[in-house]
Image (tube, rainbow, N blue to C red):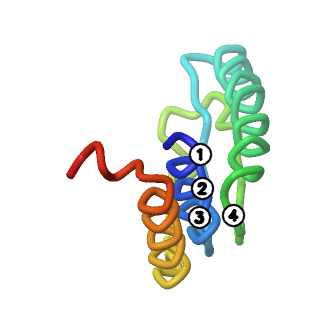
């Protein structure tokens, strides 16, 4: 049963497409030193996270800009995040049918019926 659930999950994530990703973030702080620390912390967790996500999801970036905003009272960088998410439903449905067939063939569904 876990194998079937894994197959279905893999099919769903394989059919998912995240495109036209645009990320523009300004990193601010109380003073320039705090802004620099915040900028470093964001870089330290963001890029490894994107590496892991890229392993499992199909990502296409148009823009990824992380900009430090040192010492200004007003933000000089407008924060913006946008993307388009699409899925190829046919592949998800085919995977679900295949998993249900395997469950039926191995009599796993008899437990629920």
User: Badge 3 is on which residue?
Assistant: 11
Q: Are the residues at dot 3 and dot 2 in contact (C-beta closer than 8 Å)?
A: yes
Q: Does dot 3 land on a helix, a strand or a loop?
A: helix
Residue 3 x/y as whole percent: 59, 45
Residue 106 x/y as whole percent: 50, 54
Q: Which labelled disc corresponds to residue 7?
A: 2
Q: Are the residues at dot 3 and dot 1 in contact (C-beta closer than 8 Å)?
A: no
User: Badge 1 is on which residue?
Assistant: 3
Q: Is residue 113 left or right of residue 54?
A: left
Residue 36 x/y as whole percent: 73, 22
Comes first in the chain, label 4 or label 3: 3
Q: Does dot 2 land on a helix, a strand or a loop?
A: helix
State whether residue 75 is above or below residue 70.
Answer: below
Q: Nearer the viewer, residue 22 or 84?
A: 84
Q: Nearer the viewer, residue 54 or 36?
A: 54
Residue 50 x/y as whole percent: 72, 45
Residue 80 visible from this viewpoint? no
- Furthest toward the bottom, the residue is 90
Q: Does dot 4 land on a helix, a strand or a loop?
A: strand
Q: In this rendering, which labeled residue sits more in front, label 4 or label 1?
A: 1
Q: Are the residues at dot 1 and dot 2 in contact (C-beta closer than 8 Å)?
A: yes
Q: In this rendering, which labeled residue sits more in front, label 4 or label 2?
A: 2
Q: Residue at x 50, y 48 (%)?
A: 5
């Amino acid at each position: 049963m876990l194998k079937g659930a894994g197959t279905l999950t893999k099919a769903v994530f394989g059919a998912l497409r995240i495109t036209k990703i645009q990320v523009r973030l300004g990193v601010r702080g109380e003073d320039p030193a705090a802004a620099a620390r915040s900028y470093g912390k964001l870089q330290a967790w963001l890029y490894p996270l994107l590496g892991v996500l890229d392993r499992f999801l199909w990502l296409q970036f148009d823009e990824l800009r992380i900009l430090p905003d040192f010492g200004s009272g007003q933000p000089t960088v407008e924060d913006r995040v946008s993307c388009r998410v699409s899925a190829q439903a046919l592949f998800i449905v085919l995977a679900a049918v295949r998993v249900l067939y395997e469950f039926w063939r191995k009599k796993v569904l008899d437990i629920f019926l």
